[in-house]
Image (cartoon, coloured by chain):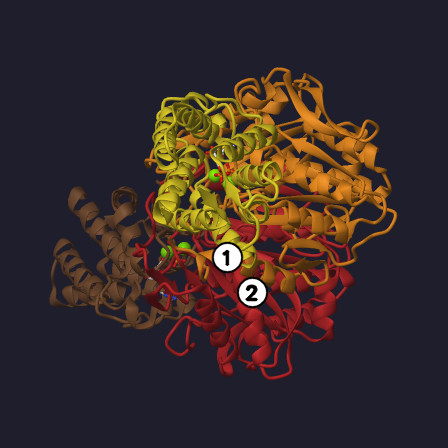
Chain colours: A red, B orange, C brown, D yellow
Amino acid sequence: MKKLINHPEDVVRESLEGFSLAYADLVKVHFDPTFVYRADAPVSGKVALISGGGSGHEPMHTGYVGRGMLSAACPGAIFTSPTPDQMLEAARTVDGGQGVLFIVKNYSGDVMNFSMAADLARSEGLRALNILIDDDVAVKNSLYTQGRRGVGATVLAEKICGAAAERGYDLPRLADLCRRVNLNARSMGVALTSCTVPAVGHPTFDLAEDQIELGIGIHGEPGQRRAQLKPADEIAEFLTLSIIEDGPYQRTVSEWNEEKEEWQDLALESPPLKYGDSVLAFVNSMGGTPAIELPILYRKLAQVCEKKGLRIARTLMGPYITSLEMAGCSITLLKLDEELASLWDDPVKTPGLRWGI
Amino acid sequence: MKKLINHPEDVVRESLEGFSLAYADLVKVHFDPTFVYRADAPVSGKVALISGGGSGHEPMHTGYVGRGMLSAACPGAIFTSPTPDQMLEAARTVDGGQGVLFIVKNYSGDVMNFSMAADLARSEGLRALNILIDDDVAVKNSLYTQGRRGVGATVLAEKICGAAAERGYDLPRLADLCRRVNLNARSMGVALTSCTVPAVGHPTFDLAEDQIELGIGIHGEPGQRRAQLKPADEIAEFLTLSIIEDGPYQRTVSEWNEEKEEWQDLALESPPLKYGDSVLAFVNSMGGTPAIELPILYRKLAQVCEKKGLRIARTLMGPYITSLEMAGCSITLLKLDEELASLWDDPVKTPGLRWGI
Amino acid sequence: MINNRTIVAWLKLAARSMEENKGYLTDLDAAIGDADHGINMERGFKKALTLISPVEDRDIDAILKTTGMALIGSVGGAAGPLYGTFFLDAAKALSHLNELSNTDLVLLFESGLKGIQRVGKAKPGDKTMIDTLQPALEALRSAFAYGTDLIEALRWMVQAAKEGMESTIPMVAKKGRASYLGERSAGHQDPGATSTYLLIQCLLDAVESQS
Amino acid sequence: MINNRTIVAWLKLAARSMEENKGYLTDLDAAIGDADHGINMERGFKKALTLISPVEDRDIDAILKTTGMALIGSVGGAAGPLYGTFFLDAAKALSHLNELSNTDLVLLFESGLKGIQRVGKAKPGDKTMIDTLQPALEALRSAFAYGTDLIEALRWMVQAAKEGMESTIPMVAKKGRASYLGERSAGHQDPGATSTYLLIQCLLDAVESQS
Ligand SMILES: Nc1ncnc2c1ncn2[C@@H]1O[C@H](COP(=O)(O)OP(=O)(O)O)[C@@H](O)[C@H]1O
Ligand SMILES: Nc1ncnc2c1ncn2[C@@H]1O[C@H](COP(=O)(O)OP(=O)(O)O)[C@@H](O)[C@H]1O
Ligand SMILES: [Mg+2]
Ligand SMILES: [Mg+2]
Ligand SMILES: [Mg+2]
Ligand SMILES: [Mg+2]
């Protein structure tokens, strides 16, 4: 294992220490329990936005803390959901009196830990809602699985909801928006190499020189299937078509009902993309894929979108949700409407995403 | 070789095609000869800033084209200096009547090609000056070598001079500023793995699991020496001290003298950093090093700076000048004064660097 | 008879077992998950040991509750809330007991299992820790019904846990991270089912070492 | 006697040689440079071939000039301006000749070498293409002084070029990318010195094939 680290068990802590020094004007870091929060928190009168998850996906989530995006992020160990005490203390710290929205990627660990945190927060009198992100079309259905994973759409939801919170959306409206972003987003990814979890010391999986993993998540887990390495055009086309041709996706999620004061099952459906839609196209590096390769994928993605009648109205390209040093990429398409596009354009000032200010 | 590409010989062209689609609002791409330029070029009344070099260092240079930074960038083949016809056509396209400053990394190929380009531009009646960037302290002296390489300082010079051009600095003043940035900047890098040039198909060098290359450039060339892999703290400390303890550095460079209308040798000296200086600290990933590791290096860098009486006034951290998928990092320290700091803070809007707008 | 010292001994053995099997559990997780289960479990039980040391002499439910809180607060991932809930719910069911009868022991596992199912919503056959826990609990119950003594009952339990753990090998996962793999998850032993087996083995060891 | 057809044949053989030796030159460059010399040279001479085809029947200087422009406009790196200048300066020295006398041939290489030194500022012993070119030129001169015929003179030249190329192995580079390596550059043959040797070998082949 070749990494620029000291001891494997110190990676997350030391990285956060350096992060807080480098971005002291934007964020603060709290340890034990560990969370990163806006330097100007709490912002009164604004709903607080909190996300989190295992570390190893940087800049997500810690890099998205700041004006116009997250109020706080709770980093877990590498690829391991953080714990409820982190989320609870983060909520106490950044709540500005308007409640907290937890943006949760749909992994059993994250879902359980964030649910516990929301229960604890509510038991202390804080308003708290959880919205799940589950956009990975590589997971075929929710009947026989944990449901689709949360991947690229997470970044988009954090940006768009962060802007809306800044504009003054109240908690239920923000939760609706976040759900809407998720229902209109779909992603799929591919790995060319495995990543190496520092505490493990060797790659999570072995891939021959001519093999790739199609339909991977962001934790070095194996994907939908192993396949031959092909030219970038064929890979980009496959990923894009998998997203565009994905049918309506139904699942039941558990959300807190504020009126009934109980968790409640909600049947949700993601409508498929259709001819004439405007989309945000997000080409993401899994970490080890260099910047010169991403536009090659984008080029094909744009051709496929054109052929399928999708208008790319916004673009994001770069390593925004990663799996340590894994080589590979993911593509996310988010159907845009005017509100989403305008919220996307709003100013954002975080270590990982910045424009307009 | 595992890459998300089609044919090795098409990498640069297809990447630029995708790049121009993704960032059509910011840049345009011209082919044969190949260069990337600001969508709003020429900006009249403003000195045009042009840089370029081999491809494979993305986002440098093409990603730095836009308001507040470069007017145009000329990408060569992977790791190969571009040719004079590219630079000349770029100069013709973006000259806004105030002349062109070429920012040139000190590699024999780049120096010769850009010198030819400047001669050609002047023969057409354009004003053109070249400033060399040579900040790599791993190259020990200029008596027995081509002189120090241009590395991390290039990004800083492009940003700072881009802001100054936007503010209306004229050509000689901009050249002075660029020279000053270069004389006050020092860098050093380390590689944990080699990169693979697509047309070559295998790694440029082999490194055992426990070995690193210290003092590398940005083209996969071997470094100053091979060493044992050590903890990140020791590597960061070594790089930082190599920069801080580097003595005055003298070299003779060739610059165009506008009055005498001839190339002229100029003796230049970089003063060493000293106790009490304010610096911009730039921690750069060589491409394959994931985002979680950089703050670990920054943490140690900050400790060393503190001990040596250097105040870190500005920070840049991320993959800004890369060597394809090479794992490794470089550190750059730029001594700041008020003018440099304020130019650094000015708004910039490019695909690779953006703030304030 | 199981008393609070037995429980503490159990948790100490569990912590050691998680440390020893860290690589094993993590490798199992690498095959169908994200290569962290052993690391998570080691971290959690290490934390539990430091937190229970001040309450070692208190009632069993206090020790179990502290363990549950420690796991929830340090394991993370899926295993944290699940094992944490196991211990919290077991603690709730056994309030202020200093010794556990056979029935109490069954209740401990029964309440813990119910907690895991409430939080994780998995069923037997989904290729999770439940596939170890459920048959282990059945075996414990029938051992006592058959009239075996505690140690013999725990041996039955360990045997059933082992079979349960191994039964996950051919299963196609329906819960947790492994479920994303679909058919590809078959042929691999579930890491959570394995750590549950280890925990039950440690309970037997603790009781044996105290008798 | 060398005429414009000989020069065209030379350039065609050169293009083929660069293609054949692309991997070899690039591997040499990987050891002390950036692994692109073979790729650059292949691209450049391929481009030169397409550009000279319309001027194949013109004077030698037109062919050489077109070659120089093609190399400058397509090779890039250090080799582009250097080889480009070699051909451009040779063209300037030989204006409007359709055939080259022995003196003209010496002049071609002399002017080319001077051009390379003007642009690149390297001296013999700096571990560059000059360490091939300079002794090769000397050998050509003395062969003619000794009274050999053209083919024999070119054989002397090729032999000297080979020795010059090999003389770069122990050298410590003082110019170009290899100079960054300091002492570590010793023990490796310089890629540019090698491509220069190949070019001279091709000239011999071209003359031989036409006689
Ligand atoms: N919903 C669930 N119900 C019961 N057990 C589960 C559930 N989800 C996951 N598990 C168990 O958790 C184990 C994985 O734990 P761990 O690797 O620590 O967490 P994560 O999957 O978040 O990385 C699985 O092997 C499985 O036994
Ligand atoms: N200043 C110079 N003078 C003469 N030859 C040089 C000089 N710099 C480099 N070279 C030659 O160029 C060769 C490298 O060419 P190439 O690899 O194509 O360019 P680059 O070094 O830019 O990648 C070296 O092997 C050396 O022979
Ligand atoms: Mg995990
Ligand atoms: Mg080169
Ligand atoms: Mg796991
Ligand atoms: Mg080279």
Kind of residue sitting beneath label 1:
Val
Q: Which residue is mark 1?
A: B11
Mark 1 C-beta closer than 8 Å to ligand 4: no
Q: Position of residue D18 (x, y in %)?
A: 41, 47
Q: Position of residue A210 (x, y in %)?
A: 32, 59
Give the letter of the chain under mark 2: A
Q: How many marks?
A: 2
Q: Quadrant of residue B192?
A: top left
Q: Position of residue C45 (x, y in %)?
A: 35, 45
Q: Is residue B184 visible?
A: no
Residue C63's disc is none
Compared across the picture, whether A251 is left or right of D202 comes to right
Query: Toward the viewer: B279 or A143?
Result: B279
Q: Is residue B333 above or below residue D12?
A: above
Q: CA distance from mark 1 to mark 2?
A: 13 Å
Comparing marks 1 and 2, which lies closer to the viewer? 1
Image quarter of the C terminus of chain C:
top left
Query: Toward the viewer: D54 or B187?
Result: D54
Q: Quadrant of residue D27?
A: top left
Q: Is residue A30 above or below residue D129?
A: below
Tell me the SS state at disc 1: helix
Q: Quadrant of residue D147?
A: top left
Query: Toward the viewer: B272 or B116?
Result: B116
Q: Position of residue D66 (x, y in %)?
A: 58, 49
Crowdedness of circle 1 by 10 Å Cα count: few (<14), some, many (20+)? many
Kind of residue sitting beneath label 2:
Tyr
Q: Which residue is mark 2?
A: A298
**CB contact under 8 Å: marks 1 and 2:** no
Give the letter of the chain under mark 1: B
Residue at the image point whose x is 24% and y is 61% from the top? C189
Q: Is residue A241 visible?
A: yes
